[in-house]
Amino acid sequence: MTNPMIEGKRADSARRRERVLKAIDAAAKNGGDITVSGLARAARVDRTFLYRHRDLLERVHAAANTPVEEGRIAAVSRASLQTDLANALERNKRLAARVRQLESRLSSQLGEAVWAESGLGAPVDIDQLQRRIAFLEQEVAAKQGELDERTEELEAARAANRELTRALNQRP
């Protein structure tokens, strides 16, 4: 003998399942927006009902991902249009930034070419000399570091020598 309460709950669950299945079919036929929230609202059930019943949730996802039949127009919602608009605006921003970047590069390269052709620029070997100067300045900095290190060692040796001399002079 089964508990009448359990039987009542099972019957209620079966009625809810039936309403959800009808809502899925209706949304698929009408080409409406198929979402868990929308179907739960249409079937007059809580969204958690769909999440507790994995088979129903899988049907919802399958219906949402099913392509529109030939000859039928896909449902366009306000949210999808706003999303498309936002995506288009972002793409326009990216393309505008890319155009500015390319214009800047082109301008720079054309400017350099005109400057080189005019003969007003510095000779080509100046670039080589400037690299040589930078290299020599780096060498000077390295040698200065070595000199500072050796000077510290010399000062330490002198201090040790003074201590030893003082110690020798103080003996009786």
Image (spheres, rainbow, N blue to C red):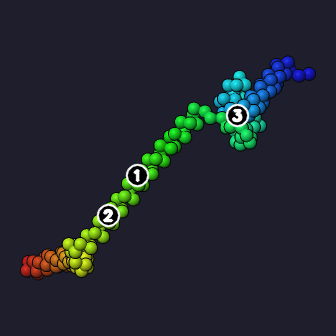
Q: Quadrant of residue 157?
A: bottom left
Q: Is residue 86 above or below residue 144?
A: above
Q: Is residue 7 above or below residue 162?
A: above
In the rendered structure, which disc, 1 or 3, sits on the residue that comes first in sequence? 3
Mark 1 sits on what residue? 97
Q: Position of residue 129 (x, y in %)?
A: 22, 79
Q: Is residue 61 left or right of residue 110?
A: right
Which quarter of the image is occupied by the C terminus? bottom left
Q: Is residue 36 left or right of residue 102?
A: right
Mark 2 sits on what residue? 108
Q: What is the distance, in whole Å, between disc 2 and disc 3 at their CAs?
A: 54 Å
Mark 3 sits on what residue? 31
Q: Amino acid at mark 2?
A: Ser
The kind of secondary structure element at disc 3 is loop
In the rendered structure, which disc, 2 or 3, sits on the residue that comes first in sequence? 3
The answer to whether the residue labelled 2 contacts the one labelled 3, judged by CB atoms less than 8 Å apart, is no
Q: Quadrant of residue 165?
A: bottom left
Which quarter of the image is occupied by the N terminus? top right
Q: Amino acid at mark 3?
A: Gly
Density class for disc 3 (Cα within 10 Å; few <14, some 14-19, many ≥20) is some
Q: Which residue corresponds to the image point at 80% horizontal and 23% vertical from the top-left?
A: 15
The kind of secondary structure element at disc 2 is helix
Q: Amino acid at mark 1?
A: Ala
Q: What is the distance, in whole Å, between disc 2 and disc 1 at their CAs?
A: 17 Å
Q: Which residue corresponds to the image point at 78% horizontal and 28% vertical from the top-left?
A: 22
Q: Could you tell me if residue 51 is visible in this image?
A: no
Q: Which residue corresponds to the image point at 70% horizontal and 34% vertical from the top-left?
A: 31
